[in-house]
Image (cartoon, grey):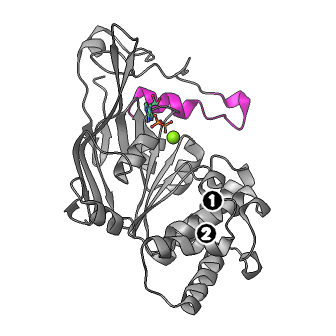
């Protein structure tokens, strides 16, 4: 099996100091010792509630944040210690699409200018005529039209703006596309169009994707394998089938039973997730889900849990 990216014991912590005199230091372990790999050509999904560390993982993988520990291996190279120039080179091959397309598109630039940016930033030596052709081709690939070329971002709908964001991300033909909640700001019908577009692009352009969302419906639709995150940790990992048909971790079960049933009579809620995701400060010693888990006992509070392979390719971090 060919891996495009492998992450070993990746850590990203945020340290905050409070108070002027007795400085109280709090550490948020937003990415707390994550290990996983992504196969070439697959869509790897990361799902979890808001605040569990998904965006921090995305930004650390892209080296937009410096890791506090662990390794990131991309295309057989350890990229942690890459120099500025090497990182710039890497970004041609590793692109990201954010949730809010609006804020990533500068309002005073036409679509043509916005799509020229990746080529300019990377000093791609390309004749103007060929660049324009390439931009028209990009517009076509993402389902926009020639007449959109000289318009400004505010003239587009949310879905169209995200299409522009995707066009920019794929402009330099990357192998790896990271999508951080790319459809979460869009209406449901538009979401489906963007998901279909991404699936088409993946086939056409041979992309490997990491797709992040808090939406289980979206992840079931788009992903091949899924990692479920809870408070900075992966607590379950497996194929879409394994996760949705045979969830092993009580947290995954709780997430799945929170999906609204089409028929309310058929309600089959095993575990209810109550309250907010607890603070990542002062984590319990043992399982971080123990404070919300209906199955938790004394042992769960004391025992450090690790991901364990329970069936082929299906991992869960629960001692029960
Ligand atoms: N730049 C930052 N400084 C301090 N804390 C941060 C920063 N970015 C994220 N966090 C904290 O890290 C945790 C994970 O955040 P984030 O990765 O944005 O989660 P998600 O994307 O899953 O909603 C949260 O507790 C958040 O408050
Ligand atoms: Mg996020």
Residue at x-position 54% and y-position 20%: 276
Which of the numbered marks, if any, corresponds to residue 190? none
x and y, in percent, of residue 231 in the image? 40, 29
Q: Earlier in the sequence, mark 2 or mark 1?
A: 1
- The answer to the question of whether label 2 and label 1 lie on touching residues, with beta carbons closer than 8 A, is yes
Residue 26 visible in the displayed image = yes
Q: Identify the secondary structure beneath mark 1.
A: loop
Residue at x-position 59% and y-position 55%: 104
Q: Is 250 colored magenta in this rendering?
A: yes
Magenta span:
248-267
Kindly identify which residue carries mark 2. 114
Quarter of the figure that contains the N terminus: bottom left
Query: Any atom of ligand 2 within 8 Å of the CB at mark 1?
Result: no
Q: Give the camera-side residue of 44 and 116.
A: 116
Q: Is residue 212 left or right of residue 161?
A: left
Vertical order, 283 against 96 (above or below): above
Residue at x-position 26% and y-position 39%: 68
Q: Is 209 colored magenta in this rendering?
A: no
Residue at x-position 49% and y-position 31%: 51
Kindly identify which residue carries mark 1. 105
Q: Dot 2 surroundings within 10 Å: few (below 14), some, or many (20 or more)?
A: many
Mark 2–mark 1 Cα distance, whole angstroms, equals 7 Å
- When asked about the image quadrant of residue 157, the answer is bottom right
Q: Give the camera-side residue of 4 and 88.
A: 88
């Amino acid at each position: 099996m060919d891996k495009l990216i492998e992450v070993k014991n990746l850590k990203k912590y945020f340290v905050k100091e409070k108070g002027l005199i007795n400085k109280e230091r709090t550490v948020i372990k937003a990415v707390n010792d994550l290990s996983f790999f992504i196969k070439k050509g697959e869509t790897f999904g990361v799902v979890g509630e808001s605040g569990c560390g998904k965006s921090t993982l995305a930004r650390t993988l892209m080296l937009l944040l410096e890791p506090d520990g662990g390794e990131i291996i991309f295309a057989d190279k350890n990229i942690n210690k890459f120099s500025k120039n090497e990182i710039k080179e890497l970004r041609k091959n590793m692109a990201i699409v954010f949730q809010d397309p609006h804020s990533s598109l500068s309002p005073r630039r036409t679509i043509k200018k916005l799509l020229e940016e990746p080529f300019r930033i990377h000093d791609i030596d390309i004749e103007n005529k060929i660049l324009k052709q390439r931009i028209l081709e990009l517009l076509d690939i993402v389902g926009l039209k020639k007449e959109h070329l000289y318009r400004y971002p505010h003239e587009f709908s949310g879905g169209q703006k995200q299409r522009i964001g995707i066009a920019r991300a794929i402009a330099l033909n990357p192998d790896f596309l990271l999508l951080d909640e790319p459809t979460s700001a869009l209406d449901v019908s538009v979401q489906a169009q963007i998901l279909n577009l991404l699936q088409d692009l993946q086939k056409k352009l041979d992309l490997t994707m990491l797709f992040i969302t808090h939406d289980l419906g979206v992840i079931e639709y788009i992903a091949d394998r899924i990692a479920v995150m809870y408070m900075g940790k992966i607590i379950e990992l497996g194929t879409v089938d394994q996760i949705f048909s045979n969830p092993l971790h009580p947290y995954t079960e709780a997430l799945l039973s929170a999906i609204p049933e089409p028929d309310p009579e058929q309600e089959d809620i095993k575990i209810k997730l109550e309250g907010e995701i607890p603070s990542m400060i002062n984590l319990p010693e043992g399982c971080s889900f123990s404070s919300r888990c209906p199955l938790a006992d004394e042992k769960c509070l004391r025992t450090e849990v690790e991901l364990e392979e329970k069936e082929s390719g299906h991992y869960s971090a629960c001692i029960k």
